[in-house]
Amino acid sequence: MSAITGRRSIRSYTGEPVDDGSIMTLLEAARWAPSGLNNQPWRFVIIRDRAMRERISGLTTYRRIVRECDACVAVFFHEPSGYDRDKDMMGIGAAVQNMLLAAHSLGLGAVWLGEILKRKGEVNAALGVDSDHELMAVVALGRPAENPESDRADLESLILKRL
């Protein structure tokens, strides 16, 4: 629970590098997310190259985050691996959450960027990814330069019924 309640979306970074081993640990955590029929419909593109991050940053209103982070991971739905879109989307969401929790546990900062999905086709083209892969998220990674506060709705207000 402490990892879940302590994790924050980190949008500012120190500029210190994130090592390749840490990125692979995040992808390993994502790989172990649950998926329907264990189909594991997620695929990843690791974006470390500064010029590529600059190019991708032009496809989102959150360009500063993409420019200033040390790396990004683009998360894709591999359509040929899918079997039920709703379940596949939930599995991919779980994979991204595992990445975020793993980042937090390693002392890294990460944020799940979704607004960039408005330009999925352009991201695929920039990354050279074929149309069998649908962009689901971009996760920006770096050493955190902030520790933002967060609050949540009162738990009772989220419970519809007790039957």
Image (cartoon, rainbow, N blue to C red):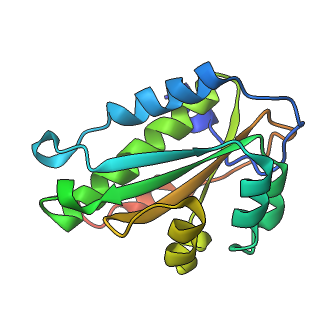
Instruction: Say if 78 sits above or below 144 in the image.
Output: below
Which quadrant of the view contains residue 134? bottom left
Q: Is residue 68 toward the left or the right of residue 66 in the image? A: right
**Which of 1/162 is in front?**
1
Quadrant in the picture for the C terminus: bottom left
Q: Position of residue 19 (x, y in %)?
A: 70, 23
Instruction: Say if 149 sits above or below 113 in the image.
Output: above
**Which of 8/79 is in front?**
79
Q: Is residue 143 toward the left or the right of residue 14 in the image? A: left
Q: Position of residue 111 (x, y in %)?
A: 65, 50
Q: Is residue 35 toward the left or the right of residue 149 in the image? A: left
Regarding residue 157, the answer to whether it shows in the image is no
Which quadrant of the view contains residue 95? top left
Regarding residue 132, the answer to whether it shows in the image is yes
Q: Is residue 79 toward the left or the right of residue 36 in the image? A: right
Q: Residue furthest bottom?
A: 118
Q: Position of residue 90 (x, y in %)?
A: 29, 56
Q: Residue at x 45, y 37 (%)?
A: 98
**Which of 12/80 is in front?**
80
Q: Residue at x 21, y 66 (%)?
A: 85
Q: Residue at x 50, y 67 (%)?
A: 124
Tally of numbered discs:
0
